[in-house]
Image (cartoon, coloured by chain):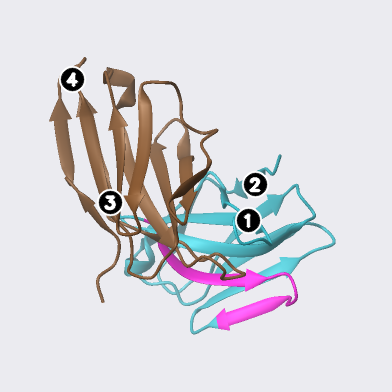
Protein backbone atom coordinates (compact mmCIF):
# COMPACT_ATOMS: atom_id res chain seq x y z
CA UNK A 1 0.00 0.00 0.00
CA UNK A 2 1.58 3.27 -1.10
CA UNK A 3 2.08 5.92 1.50
CA UNK A 4 2.01 9.66 0.96
CA UNK A 5 3.91 10.54 -2.19
CA UNK A 6 5.75 13.82 -2.62
CA UNK A 7 7.62 15.26 -5.54
CA UNK A 8 10.20 16.39 -6.18
CA UNK A 9 12.33 14.99 -3.36
CA UNK A 10 14.90 17.72 -3.83
CA UNK A 11 14.57 21.14 -5.40
CA UNK A 12 17.26 23.74 -5.88
CA UNK A 13 16.21 27.06 -7.32
CA UNK A 14 17.31 30.64 -7.51
CA UNK A 15 15.78 33.44 -5.56
CA UNK A 16 12.77 34.90 -7.34
CA UNK A 17 11.79 31.72 -9.13
CA UNK A 18 8.47 29.97 -8.70
CA UNK A 19 8.52 26.65 -6.86
CA UNK A 20 5.75 24.06 -6.91
CA UNK A 21 5.71 21.13 -4.52
CA UNK A 22 3.36 18.22 -5.09
CA UNK A 23 1.64 15.72 -2.87
CA UNK A 24 -0.51 12.64 -3.36
CA UNK A 25 -2.22 11.59 -0.12
CA UNK A 26 -2.99 8.04 0.88
CA UNK A 27 -6.03 6.79 -0.99
CA UNK A 28 -9.20 7.22 1.06
CA UNK A 29 -7.75 9.88 3.34
CA UNK A 30 -9.77 13.07 3.42
CA UNK A 31 -7.46 15.39 5.33
CA UNK A 32 -4.21 16.75 3.99
CA UNK A 33 -1.59 18.80 5.79
CA UNK A 34 1.43 20.80 4.63
CA UNK A 35 4.29 21.27 7.09
CA UNK A 36 7.62 23.04 6.95
CA UNK A 37 10.61 21.86 8.99
CA UNK A 38 13.70 23.92 9.79
CA UNK A 39 16.34 23.70 12.48
CA UNK A 40 15.32 27.03 13.93
CA UNK A 41 11.54 26.64 13.99
CA UNK A 42 11.05 22.90 14.04
CA UNK A 43 7.93 21.40 12.48
CA UNK A 44 5.37 24.06 11.53
CA UNK A 45 1.89 23.46 10.13
CA UNK A 46 1.33 25.69 7.12
CA UNK A 47 -2.17 24.73 5.99
CA UNK A 48 -4.58 21.83 6.08
CA UNK A 49 -7.51 20.68 4.00
CA UNK A 50 -10.55 18.57 4.77
CA UNK A 51 -12.39 17.14 1.77
CA UNK A 52 -10.31 19.38 -0.50
CA UNK A 53 -11.38 22.53 1.35
CA UNK A 54 -8.77 24.67 3.15
CA UNK A 55 -9.68 24.73 6.83
CA UNK A 56 -6.81 26.57 8.49
CA UNK A 57 -4.14 28.49 6.60
CA UNK A 58 -2.98 30.58 9.54
CA UNK A 59 0.46 28.99 9.32
CA UNK A 60 1.12 30.18 5.78
CA UNK A 61 3.96 32.65 6.27
CA UNK A 62 2.96 35.24 3.70
CA UNK A 63 1.20 35.85 0.42
CA UNK A 64 4.07 34.33 -1.51
CA UNK A 65 2.80 30.95 -0.35
CA UNK A 66 -0.33 29.36 -1.76
CA UNK A 67 -1.78 25.86 -1.63
CA UNK A 68 -4.44 24.10 -3.62
CA UNK A 69 -6.20 20.78 -3.52
CA UNK A 70 -8.14 20.39 -6.76
CA UNK A 71 -9.19 16.82 -5.97
CA UNK A 72 -8.90 14.17 -3.30
CA UNK A 73 -5.71 12.72 -4.68
CA UNK A 74 -3.56 15.76 -5.35
CA UNK A 75 -2.34 18.92 -3.69
CA UNK A 76 0.24 21.57 -4.49
CA UNK A 77 2.16 24.08 -2.43
CA UNK A 78 3.47 27.00 -4.45
CA UNK A 79 5.99 29.66 -3.52
CA UNK A 80 6.21 32.67 -5.80
CA UNK A 81 8.63 34.36 -5.70
CA UNK A 82 10.93 32.15 -3.65
CA UNK A 83 13.47 33.56 -1.20
CA UNK A 84 16.53 32.03 0.51
CA UNK A 85 14.68 31.97 3.86
CA UNK A 86 12.17 29.56 2.33
CA UNK A 87 14.86 26.89 2.31
CA UNK A 88 13.52 24.01 4.39
CA UNK A 89 12.10 20.53 4.18
CA UNK A 90 8.41 20.56 3.28
CA UNK A 91 6.28 17.63 4.35
CA UNK A 92 2.85 16.60 3.28
CA UNK A 93 0.75 14.39 5.57
CA UNK A 94 -2.66 12.82 5.22
CA UNK A 95 -5.24 11.57 7.67
CA UNK A 96 -8.56 9.76 7.45
CA UNK A 97 -11.30 12.30 8.15
CA UNK A 98 -13.67 11.19 10.83
CA UNK A 99 -11.06 9.22 12.68
CA UNK A 100 -11.37 10.45 16.25
CA UNK A 101 -7.69 10.21 16.85
CA UNK A 102 -6.51 11.96 13.72
CA UNK A 103 -3.51 9.80 12.91
CA UNK A 104 -1.39 11.63 10.40
CA UNK A 105 0.90 9.86 8.00
CA UNK A 106 3.80 11.80 6.58
CA UNK A 107 5.42 11.70 3.18
CA UNK A 108 9.20 11.61 2.67
CA UNK A 109 9.40 15.38 2.24
CA UNK A 110 10.81 17.79 -0.33
CA UNK A 111 14.09 19.44 0.54
CA UNK A 112 13.99 22.95 -0.94
CA UNK A 113 17.11 25.05 -1.34
CA UNK A 114 16.75 28.61 -2.58
CA UNK A 115 20.04 30.26 -3.52
CA UNK B 1 -3.71 28.35 21.80
CA UNK B 2 -2.29 24.94 22.48
CA UNK B 3 1.39 24.71 23.33
CA UNK B 4 3.48 21.55 23.68
CA UNK B 5 6.82 21.58 25.46
CA UNK B 6 9.22 18.66 25.01
CA UNK B 7 12.30 17.72 27.04
CA UNK B 8 15.13 16.99 26.78
CA UNK B 9 16.21 18.38 23.43
CA UNK B 10 19.02 15.81 23.23
CA UNK B 11 19.46 12.48 24.96
CA UNK B 12 22.38 10.08 24.81
CA UNK B 13 22.18 6.57 26.28
CA UNK B 14 24.15 3.36 26.13
CA UNK B 15 22.73 0.47 24.17
CA UNK B 16 20.49 -1.57 26.42
CA UNK B 17 19.61 1.31 28.71
CA UNK B 18 16.20 2.97 28.87
CA UNK B 19 15.30 6.36 27.44
CA UNK B 20 12.53 8.67 28.61
CA UNK B 21 11.22 11.74 26.79
CA UNK B 22 8.67 14.02 28.42
CA UNK B 23 6.09 16.45 27.07
CA UNK B 24 3.68 18.87 28.64
CA UNK B 25 0.64 20.43 27.00
CA UNK B 26 -1.37 23.50 27.84
CA UNK B 27 -4.89 22.82 26.57
CA UNK B 28 -6.87 20.56 28.89
CA UNK B 29 -9.24 19.79 26.00
CA UNK B 30 -6.49 17.84 24.23
CA UNK B 31 -7.31 14.16 24.12
CA UNK B 32 -5.01 12.55 21.56
CA UNK B 33 -1.23 12.29 21.97
CA UNK B 34 0.88 10.65 19.26
CA UNK B 35 4.62 10.13 19.14
CA UNK B 36 6.61 10.30 15.93
CA UNK B 37 10.09 9.03 15.09
CA UNK B 38 12.04 10.80 12.38
CA UNK B 39 15.15 9.25 10.93
CA UNK B 40 17.65 11.24 8.93
CA UNK B 41 16.32 12.18 5.53
CA UNK B 42 12.86 10.75 6.16
CA UNK B 43 9.46 12.00 7.21
CA UNK B 44 8.13 11.56 10.74
CA UNK B 45 6.71 8.10 11.36
CA UNK B 46 3.93 7.45 13.84
CA UNK B 47 5.23 4.92 16.39
CA UNK B 48 2.66 4.97 19.18
CA UNK B 49 -0.23 7.08 20.39
CA UNK B 50 -2.42 7.36 23.45
CA UNK B 51 -5.89 8.67 24.05
CA UNK B 52 -7.06 10.55 27.09
CA UNK B 53 -9.21 7.69 28.35
CA UNK B 54 -6.17 5.54 29.16
CA UNK B 55 -3.14 6.13 31.31
CA UNK B 56 -0.59 3.85 29.68
CA UNK B 57 -0.03 1.96 26.47
CA UNK B 58 2.73 -0.46 25.50
CA UNK B 59 3.99 -1.80 22.21
CA UNK B 60 6.98 -4.12 22.61
CA UNK B 61 9.89 -1.94 23.83
CA UNK B 62 7.92 1.29 23.61
CA UNK B 63 5.46 2.63 26.14
CA UNK B 64 3.65 5.92 26.60
CA UNK B 65 2.14 7.23 29.82
CA UNK B 66 -0.35 10.04 30.26
CA UNK B 67 -1.12 12.14 33.33
CA UNK B 68 -4.18 14.22 32.48
CA UNK B 69 -4.20 16.04 35.79
CA UNK B 70 -0.66 17.28 35.35
CA UNK B 71 -1.09 17.59 31.57
CA UNK B 72 2.02 15.68 30.70
CA UNK B 73 2.84 12.51 28.82
CA UNK B 74 6.03 10.55 28.33
CA UNK B 75 7.64 8.12 25.92
CA UNK B 76 9.62 5.24 27.38
CA UNK B 77 11.96 3.11 25.30
CA UNK B 78 13.46 0.07 27.01
CA UNK B 79 16.46 -2.01 25.94
CA UNK B 80 17.51 0.67 23.49
CA UNK B 81 19.26 -0.31 20.29
CA UNK B 82 21.39 1.76 17.90
CA UNK B 83 18.53 1.77 15.39
CA UNK B 84 16.44 3.67 17.93
CA UNK B 85 18.68 6.68 17.27
CA UNK B 86 16.49 9.35 15.69
CA UNK B 87 14.56 12.52 16.46
CA UNK B 88 11.37 11.92 18.41
CA UNK B 89 8.41 14.31 18.39
CA UNK B 90 5.41 14.38 20.68
CA UNK B 91 2.15 16.04 19.69
CA UNK B 92 -1.28 16.86 21.07
CA UNK B 93 -4.70 17.32 19.51
CA UNK B 94 -8.21 18.19 20.58
CA UNK B 95 -10.95 15.71 19.84
CA UNK B 96 -12.60 16.75 16.61
CA UNK B 97 -12.80 15.68 13.04
CA UNK B 98 -10.83 18.66 11.85
CA UNK B 99 -8.36 19.32 14.62
CA UNK B 100 -4.68 19.81 13.92
CA UNK B 101 -1.71 18.35 15.74
CA UNK B 102 0.52 20.63 17.79
CA UNK B 103 4.07 19.29 17.86
CA UNK B 104 6.77 19.52 20.47
CA UNK B 105 10.23 20.74 19.56
CA UNK B 106 11.74 17.29 19.18
CA UNK B 107 14.32 15.19 21.05
CA UNK B 108 17.42 13.86 19.36
CA UNK B 109 18.12 10.42 20.81
CA UNK B 110 21.52 8.86 20.37
CA UNK B 111 22.03 5.25 21.38
CA UNK B 112 25.70 4.40 21.71
CA UNK B 113 26.70 0.82 20.88
Tags 1 and 3 on a common chain: no
Indicate the chain on which mark 2 is placed: B
Q: Nearer the viewer, mark 4 or mark 2?
A: 4
**Mark 4 burial class by Cα count in 10 Å: few <14, some 14-19, many 20+:** few
Q: Which residue is mark 2?
A: B4
Label 4, on which residue? A17
Chain letter belonging to callout 3: A
Residue A77, how many percent across, how many down? 32, 38
Question: Residue A11: which quarter of the image?
Answer: top left
Dominant secondary structure of the magenta stretch? strand
**Apparent side of residue B39 relative to residue B47 in the rendered image (left or right):** left
Per the rendered image, the range of residues in magenta is B44-58
Q: Nearer the viewer, mark 1 or mark 3?
A: 3
- Identify the residue at image location x=29%, y=32%: A78
The residues tagged by marks 2 and 1 sit, at their Cα atoms, a distance apart of: 7 Å
Q: Position of residue B78 (x, y in %)?
A: 51, 76
- Asked whether the residues under the numbered discs 3 and 4 touch, taking CB atoms below 8 Å apart as contact, a structural biologist would say no
Amino acid sequence: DAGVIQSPRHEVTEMGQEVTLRCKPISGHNSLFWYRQTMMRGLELLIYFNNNVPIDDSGMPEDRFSAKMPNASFSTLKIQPSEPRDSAVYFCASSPLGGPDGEQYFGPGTRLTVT
Amino acid sequence: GENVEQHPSTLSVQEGDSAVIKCTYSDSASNYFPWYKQELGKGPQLIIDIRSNVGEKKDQRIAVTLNKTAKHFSLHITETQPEDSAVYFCAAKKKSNTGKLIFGQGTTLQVKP
